[in-house]
Amino acid sequence: MKHKNAKKYGMVIDLDKCTGCGSCMVACMAENNVPFRKDESNKVLSITWLRVYQLTNGKPFPNTDICYLPRPCMHCEGQHEGHSPCVSVCPAVATDYNTETGIVSQIYTRCFGCRYCMASCPYHARYFNWWDPVWPDGMEKYLSPNVSPRMRGVVEKCSFCFHRYQLAKEKAFKEGRREIKEDEYQTACTQACPAGAITFGDLNNPNHAVSRMVKPDPKHHGRPTNPNAFRLLERLGTNPKVYYLSSREWVRRAGDNYLENEAKYKKTVHQG
Amino acid sequence: MKIDRRSFLSFLLGGAAGTALSPLPWKLTDDSSIWTQMWPWTPVPEDGEASYVNSSCTLCPGGCGITVRKIDDRAVKIEGMKRHPVNNGGLCSLGLSGLQLLYGPTRVKTPLKRVGKRGRGRWEKISWKDAVSEVAKTLGDLREKGQSHTVGFISGSDRGTVPRLFERFLTVYGSPNLIRTPSIIDSYELALHLMQGAQALPGFDFENANFILSFGSGIVDGWGSPVRMFRANSAWRDTGGKVIQIEPRLSNTAAKSDKWIPINPGTEAALALGIAHIIIKESLYDAEFINNYSEGFEDWKAFVLGEYGPDSVATITGIDSTTIIALARSFARASKPLAICGRGQGTTPGSLNECTAVHALNALVGNINKKGGVFAVAEPDYINWPEVEMDATAAAGMQKNRLDGAGSKKYPFSRYLLNRLPQAINSGKKYPLKALFVAGANPLYTMSDSKAVKKAFDKVPFIVSFSSYMDETAQNADLILPNHNYLERYEDIPTPAGMPQPVIGLSRPVVEPQFNTKHVGDVIILLAKAMGGTLSDAFAWDSYDACLKETMGYKWQVIIEKGFWSYPDFVAGPREESFDTVSGKFEFAPKETGSLKPFKPVKIEGDKTNYPLLLMPYDSIRLANGAMGDPPFVMKSVDDTVLKGTDVFIEINPKTAGEHGLREGQLAMLSTPVGQAKVKVHLFDGIMPGLVALPRGLGHTAYDEYLAGKGINVNELIGPVEDPVSGLDAAWGVRAKLAKA
Ligand code: SF4
Ligand code: SF4
Ligand code: SF4
């Protein structure tokens, strides 16, 4: 159901500014009670709602270049609003597309761990809890009451810090306001980024910085019209709400490139 | 890791096929989701009243402002303080993980006394009273025997009230051996002293500069005050400021810069002089500054013009002469150029000649004590305590030469030379160190040539650590007197590294002390009182907090409310008053530095025949490598091309790896004249052939299971090399060889 004042929260990450420092990853872990284990070097198992990848241009010394790319959940809109790849496949309705905000949620208590959503997410944004979380004695003191810790057997992912949205709404409501201001709802990573590389806001609102930065084209599912902006795997048609900016062409190509024999895959891809 | 589209897609296909073929009945789904609710063994964090406390992060010399979110009496999240002059809301990953240190398993929870052999990890609890009297007795005995000078104190800082209490204590007690841990700041202080006659810290006005010539400084890798540097770097992206990064390896800073110029390692000083050569030859320098405010320019000019033509510099540095010429011109013609040095995070002081050569470039373009330039920032003088009274023992002790040789005939200008301490102890030539105190530092981990350091520490009969955490030095101490964690205590944080104006930050208790710990300032006061006489006279305060409050005076109220004290009206003195050298001017070639002698590269350890490769440590902001180690969250952010399981990767150019018959991921033995270690190979095109690089910050033997036992400590493979003028550690690497393991 479409709300009248529906928001479409999205993110713009300026890869020219991102330094790969990892603050966003860690701010996210600290905000969202993300667990950790003794060995986190197996990155398939390591739960990082937001993960910073390193891209390289593949050229030999001294023409080598690297670029970092932080990857939260893309909160894919899909071909029709709400047809995110993961939402479409979940048999338990444990992951849901919120039409009021455009945020793809994960309801842990409904998830029973079939991991279809993980398989369907082209961005590897979802993680499975293979173990119960364990905090060293005393460390559970820092756990935030705003985000429930997850248990073994469920899938988790970036929520665009949805609890912050709820807190901001509550505050506005108490103050008799129906709308929340742009700076009242910001994600933890946006706030922490020392380089100011992340911008967060409402893509439906032309006054919000995100809209001004990428100039989304509503006729084409929000495809960016800023020539330096791109979305990951644009041609899959997942219509992510996370945009990237880069002045380096090789970076933009790396973000939306296909396998040599892409045509073969394309149809399957659109099933999401 | 590269994003691999193949794996993106393969996952996707699996999902699509899986949905279509799934035999899973919906009933089962429903059942299991009901069954999965309310797991009793996942904690349910208690809700309560939310509040925020402003404080300062002291986990590095960056001095960021923090705002800590609390739920009742629990701290649940650290965030950057908005509108703080250093970080305005942003934070590094270490600062963001501070609660894992506060509540983590590495805390030392009560005073501990060693049982059995040192370093075995067997301790008994001891009361604060007994602990303090034990230290007082040991110190008293030494003093009685006229050996007060055999007491040493290693401190992470020498500024602010806490380090000044250490200094005061040692002075009245009678030991000259307070040693600050080293960094590029040491070289800069010396350069400012010799060239400008200043007793000051270097301040860099990055916010107003627009052309940064960085000789390997990790602008976005943790150099200076890290978050401030990140912000400046982003501002240059918006305003069109340029960064030129000169270093042999494509660091994150190099990757973010506008131009990366790889250079033969260790030849940066020659490049700086080569750039000066062009600027002088083409008269691109600031004649007004040179004519009115400098001294020795003619001599220096003759030297630079004679020795550092672009062709000879090209041969030394490996950078072609056209690039050098273009670089010199764009630097001199930029409206606000600024040259900086200090490799990576500025972890080591480096060669003094390199620092003075780079600083001379700033002088050439008239960039001293000027908007967008380098400032000599005097320490804010808010600490005005009554003079101490020294008895005869103290006076005699203070007359003794320092054990590390700082201020000696050989190294008259240096203030601290921690790198020389192990040698001084091990050789036994001067005098033994009978007791050693360590605060805010972890020398057993951070000092290079770990074996020699360990040997020296083994020779010291009494080691006291004030660490809040069970780090390597605490582990090898005889007594641990744990300080409150930084979120449990008051402390003033004067001017963060590299700030062009003085700022005093305040660290304050965010939560009650969680354990039986004591503020190190209080311990010093208690100790002085226990020792009586002139010592207790010099420490008349009731407590550290009282001392701090009294010291801050009228500033206290503001600093408590705002979280920091800034000097918005601060202006560096006019040019006429800027230089306190004998000539009253900027000295281009202070004779003490021997800077008119031709460039000689730092002689790093090892010979080319046996060790054909060069090993360089590198700094990453995701790997804390100072007194603090990585908390679990930050460890989690370390890439799997840096650490896999317990194996660390060396970076090596594919060409060099090919010559050694090494493939990606292969195990290899890395040896240097100092030590050897097993490493894994990571092929990286961004590193100069012939070089290998290892990250600092791994290979801990202390801290928790999330950090300890992973990778190797690069300090086990590299030793210090004394700079001939400063005596500081000038090593930037070591020769190495690599063989299949
Ligand atoms: S915190 Fe900002 S600069 Fe650091 S990795 Fe994340 S997006 Fe990049
Ligand atoms: S990125 Fe993945 S998890 Fe997020 S909405 Fe898209 S498909 Fe779902
Ligand atoms: S940069 Fe330094 S002071 Fe700032 S948050 Fe990080 S560790 Fe703390």
Image (cartoon, rainbow, N blue to C red):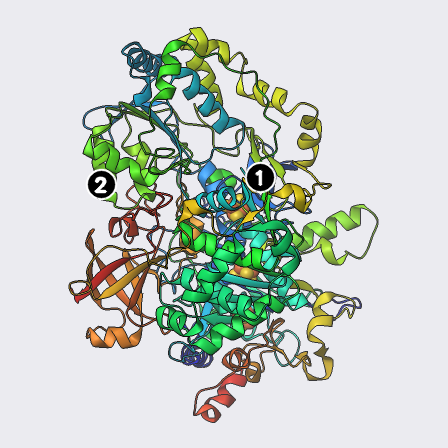
Circle on res. B580 = 1
Are circles 2 and 1 on residues that touch, CB within 8 Å?
Answer: no
Front residue of B283/B689: it is B283
Q: Residue B188: where, in percent of width, then height?
A: 48, 46
Whether residue B317 is visible here, answered yes or no, is yes
Q: Residue B307: where, in percent of width, then height?
A: 40, 65
Total numbered labels placed on residues in the image:
2
Circle on res. B340 = none
Question: Tag 2, which secondary structure?
Answer: helix
Circle on res. B452 = 2
Mark 2 CB in 8 Å range of ligand 3?
A: no
Whether residue A21 is visible here, answered yes or no, is no
Q: In this view, does B379 lie above or below B450?
A: above
Left of A219 or right of it: where is B598?
A: left
Indicate the quadrant containing the C terminus of chain B: top left, top right, bottom left or bottom right.
Answer: bottom left
* Marked residue chain, label 2: B
